[in-house]
Image (spheres, rainbow, N blue to C red):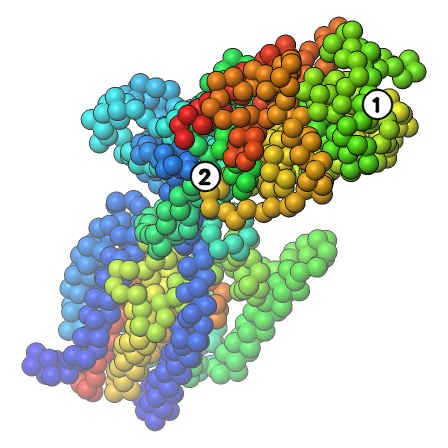
Amino acid sequence: MTAKLRNFDYLSFAVMIALIAIGTVSVWSAGNARTEAVFHGTWLRNLATAAFGLVLYLAIAFSDYRRWLGLVAAPAYCLALALLVAVLIFGSEQFGGRRWLWFFQPSEISKLCVIAMIAWLYGGEDSPIAGVRRTFRGFLIAAAVVGLPALLILKEPDLGTALTLIPAAVVMLVVAGVWRRGLVTILAGGGIAALMVLGAVYEAERPGVARERRDKIMRFVPLRDHQVRRVKTFLFQDEDQTGAGYNLRQAKIAIGSGGFSGKGIGKSDSSHLKYLPQAVSMNDFIFCVYAEETGFIGSLVLLALFGTLLVLGCRAAFLSADGGGRLLALGVSTLVFAHVYVNVAMSIGVVPITGLPLPFISSGRTFLITAMCGFGVIQSVTIHREVKKR
Amino acid sequence: MSAGDSLAGRLSCCALAMAFIVGLLHLAVRLREVQVVEAADYGYILGRQAERRVQTGGTRGRIFDRNGSVLADNRESVSIICRPSFFKKRTWDEIASGIIAAISNVESVVGRPSPVTAKDVRRHIARSLAMPLPVWRDVDDGELARFSERESEFPGFAAEVVAERVYPQRRLAAHLLGYVGRDRGESVAGDEKFNFFLPELRGRSGIEHYYDGFLIGVPGERKLLVDARGFTIREWTVVEAKKGPDLRLTIDSGVQRAVERQLRGEIGACVVLDPRNGEVLAMASAPGFDPNDFVPVLRTEVYERFAGDPSKPLLNRATGGAFAPGSTFKPITALAGLRAGYPETAEYNCDGVYQLGMMRIHCARRWGHGELDLRRALMKSCNPFFCNLGMDIGTNALIAAARDFGLGRRTGVDFGVDSPGVVPDGEWKLRKYREKWFQGDLAQMSIGQGMLLVTPLQMAMVAGAIGTGYSVMPHLKADMAPVRRPLPFAAAHLRAVREGMRMVVAGDGESGGSGWRGGEGVPVPVSGKTGTAEVGRRDRRRNNTWFIAYAPSEAPRVAVAMLIEDGVSGGGTAAPKVAEILKAVFNDG
């Protein structure tokens, strides 16, 4: 135990706690701004969730991941797949997507499960496919392992989750050395497809395009209506300021009006005056509230905290002597980075708006626990980094 | 194997860390753009969408008469208002019905139905949601007490003190003072400085209207912080409104009261002014009204009573009504004749009727005055004399004289209603009636009949100008420099006409003048001229009776014009009333 405590990454832990504290304050501010009294206590529920997450975090951190990865990965992955199927059948509809099952979102949990599965298959010493990792067969297996949950998540649809899971998986597979040609092909194909979709939407929604032409083009665009709207808003940021563009505009106004030093904690005009869309001000748009209240300084502090956390995640991978551990750490770090990047970038119009929480800050309980468990895993990788036979 | 090949694996860890840092730096750079470079723009946009600027009106200035007695004042009035932000609901319809229901609840406590309709509420929500809606204006003490007792039961309702106009002398000088009204407090579209204008009192007629910009003071500014739906969250005052300055008039309440006493029960108008400087001492029109009826808002039934009244109580006859001057025009005809070279001693014979083709103009004295000169013609108001004189000098000379007295032209008085009247000529008649100018028209005009129209204010000016020898621009605001213009008539001619007008009141020693009652009991000598203008068609012929006068005769300090519609005669109806007014003026000093 003393060895474990010696290896414990206190800085990472402290940064995580700091982020949770920032999140709690932001949720308190955004919640107070809402008319419905029920949201005034959301920050407290979040704090309770964080306490529960902390127990999980410590439990995972101090248990040797090498001991349970092989046991847990496959069943967890199968369970995640089952939940993703279940949510499509029994889930409750909200904001144009079927994402909720009872009190949690299976897609959030599935992120960790997929990462664990890939880490085990492509890094674990007891992996059943240890011999074929770098072959075409290994690539096919990887495609199936990532593609299956990704398709189910897209079916909900939860484009944001799919978009964060895929980079994490790709990074892990690249580091694991999976058949490169296949990966490159898929990535290039995906990139080209994404550009084509963007180009098609641009061509179709450009002002002055005839209706028939628009409809003809849009028939080939594999996006839902609300997704098309978001892409449109992104492409033509200054045109539509009331409809779909309203959210983006208000997000930018909130962040921009915060200025250099912010308006002070709890003094976000945009959320208190309800210009910021109320339904998402505590979740996907929490960064706007935070940035308006703390200004550019606050934004930098937040980015620095995330940077520290992510670099420490890479350090864990760097120090790990174990392939599985390294992949786990890199996967979780990439996943969190993707969330941070997309969430902040969408608030200022750098990427299209997608429903993604900001790790530790947004008031999503499922994702808070997911993220804490993820960093628990990284902590476990840090603690158990020495080569040691069981 | 696998991740065991450490070097490549470890390098990729470093590469990934670098990638993360680059990504976060990218965000930092973009955030700097938004939060530092463009921060001011976004701050401005937030202000634009979240702030409403309200222009608030200051208290109106008071209006005094020349001696400092108050004609228009302000009083504190309590309104019960409703703040829409207390009725937040999901849809606008729910908000409107919530407010309407709440109003009817409060109604049962206040005990007076609110004039605010469901339509008003919807309109208010649509146009000025951020502002309070006045539900009851000017509630009395009992209503306020009942409301205050249970105010806490009605969130969103409050009592608010506003300034209302009050006219303490009630009907006195109503047409002169005018009245006030409220604009709707609506939002203003576009990039105006203000989003809302408080429904402040604006002058709608009379002095209140003409001097509105003077009385209204300097507006203040309030800011409202509104949420995304437009409800007010917070409000504060940026600039306090300043009270408007007080206005002192040339009006003398005592004279005004005397004038109105004489007009009581009549339809008519009277103007009293100081011919030396143009100060209007009294100006009244009858029937009148009480301007307090227009406060806080003009009620429909009151308005309908005014609108349906054939005697037009809202019409200011003193400056806005145009009437045939009748014989009061004869001094002008006389002056025109003298200027044209007719000696003042020349006589015409009056046999009781003046005949021109088919047209017969009778004299007041059916059997005629016989031979008489200009002074006695004025004194007796002999029609044939002036018809003959007019025919002899011609249309142009007569018209020129009328215009020299300012007839047919706005007087320039500082008042909104200032009718020019009509001095007809050939061109005018052709344009208006598509008819040539006949000799008969000239004969009619010579005795102030026909198409000639004047206002009582103009006739008061004529009387004063004859008395002083110069015309002045009339004015109502005190302490204005007089604008004088000498009359283009020779002093000797004026003297002759003045003598005639003196004889109208005083007689010539043998017989009395037509306006002898105009000087009855007045402590100073009075000069004047009667007038009885026949108006209306043959079957409904009425007499508009006039008396114009100035006094004291030798150095006039007061000029009066009195018009009574549907009287008996100028000498019998109007002259005694003028005498009463002059008694009030000169007995009080």
Which numbered marker is on residue B249?
Answer: 2
- Establish if B138 lies above or below B208: above
Q: Is the N terminus of chain A in the top left, top right, bottom left or bottom right quadrant?
A: bottom left
Q: Quadrant of residue A263?
A: bottom left
Which numbered marker is on residue A110?
Answer: none
* Residue A38 seen in the current view: yes
Q: Please name the residue that numbered disc 1 is placed on.
A: B388
Tell me the residue at 45%/61% (across/down): B45
| First in residue order: circle 1 vs circle 2 | 2
Q: Residues within 10 Å of mark 1 (few under 14, many from 20)?
A: some
Side (left or right) of B124 relative to B5:
right
CB contact under 8 Å: marks 1 and 2: no
Residue toward you, B512 or A312: B512
- Give the amino acid at mark 1: Asn
Q: Is the C terminus of chain A in the top left, top right, bottom left or bottom right quadrant?
A: bottom left
- Give the amino acid at mark 2: Leu
